[in-house]
Image (cartoon, helix red, strand yellow):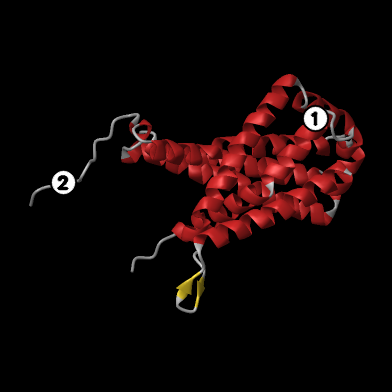
């Protein structure tokens, strides 16, 4: 059988999709409730979030979580663009490059933010 | 030798509007836009947090503005659709076998929703209190 590098993409796709399915809705709802003032503002105070994101464990969790979300979304968007009409080999290649370049840029942003935090 | 002729299926541009199941498929795939946009927003928030209290305050003000809240609501809707469709497919993407019999799909989905409920309540409690 021909060797394929596809599992390299499937793993982050599946892991990101699973994390997004289980964790993201409650996280979004929590931040939404805080933004609406239903949760106390102290829940998202600078000190509290800095303490969480600045802790090595929080840092690691954020790194893995955000990177997987970004690469999940980029891979799915690339595949969906084909369904939306990007079918020629050349344009498909460009769609893939743009999606993964965006994911790489977002990854750099995440790593940088956690680095200086 | 003649050139190999490739098969090029011709699909109308809006083929996915033809059947409800195609529409659901396309909606499921497009949830990645909501998830990606929200993840990038979180990344920007993280950067602003790293830049200090004033920067964080500015981010939070924009995040909780009417436009920010509207964005959050839309992103949440996308993500909930992702959750439901992800769990719906779970029995196909990771079927579980017990000996010769397959665990019923309904039971696999139920297990996913139970874990989802526990995780969600835990996150809401941790953030809110």
Rendered image: mark on residue A35: 1
Residue lying at 60% horizontally and 44% vertically, measured from the top left:
A70
Q: Is residue A27 visible?
A: yes
For the image, the number of numbered tags is: 2
Q: Position of residue B64 (x, y in %)?
A: 78, 26
Q: Quadrant of the N terminus of chain A?
A: bottom left
Determine the residue located farthest toward the bottom in the rendered image.
B99
Label 2: chain? B
Q: For this view, does A61 lie left or right of residue B110? A: right
Residue lying at 35% horizontally and 33% vertically, measured from the top left:
A85
Query: Badge 1: how crowded within 10 Å, few (<14), some, or many (20+)?
Result: many
Query: Badge 2: how crowded within 10 Å, few (<14), some, or many (20+)?
Result: few
B110 and A63: which is toward the camera: B110
Residue lying at 89% horizontally and 37% vertically, measured from the top left:
A46
> Is disc 2 placed on a helix, strand or loop?
loop
- Location of mark 2 (residue): B5
Q: For this view, does B49 lie left or right of residue B82? A: right
Label 1: chain? A
Q: For this view, does B96 lie left or right of residue A42? A: left
Q: Position of residue B47 (x, y in %)?
A: 76, 37
B63 and B26: which is toward the camera: B26
Q: Position of residue A78 (x, y in %)?
A: 46, 41
A57 and B69: which is toward the camera: B69
């Amino acid at each position: 059988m021909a060797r394929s590098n596809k599992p390299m993409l499937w793993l982050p796709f599946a892991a990101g999709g699973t994390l997004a399915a289980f964790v993201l809705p409650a996280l979004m709802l929590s931040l939404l409730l805080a933004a609406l003032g239903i949760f106390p503002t102290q829940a998202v105070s600078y000190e509290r979030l800095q303490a969480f994101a600045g802790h090595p464990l929080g840092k690691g969790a954020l790194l893995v979580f955000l990177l997987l979300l970004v690469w999940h979304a980029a891979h799915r968007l690339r595949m969906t663009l084909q369904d939306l009409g990007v079918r020629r080999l050349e344009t498909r290649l460009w769609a893939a490059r743009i999606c993964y370049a965006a994911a790489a840029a977002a990854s750099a942003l995440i790593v940088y933010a956690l680095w200086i935090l | 030798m003649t050139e190999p002729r490739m098969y090029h299926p011709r699909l109308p541009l809006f083929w996915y509007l033809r059947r409800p199941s195609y529409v659901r498929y396309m909606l499921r795939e497009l949830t990645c836009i909501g998830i990606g946009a929200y993840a990038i927003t979180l990344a920007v928030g993280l950067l602003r947090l790293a830049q200090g209290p004033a920067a964080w305050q500015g981010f939070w003000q924009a995040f909780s503005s009417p436009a920010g809240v509207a964005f959050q609501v839309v992103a949440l809707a996308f993500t909930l659709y992702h959750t439901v469709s992800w769990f719906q497919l779970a029995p196909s993407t990771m079927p579980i076998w017990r000996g010769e019999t397959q665990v019923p799909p309904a039971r696999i989905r139920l297990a996913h929703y139970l874990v989802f409920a526990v995780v969600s309540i835990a996150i809401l409690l941790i953030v809110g209190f």
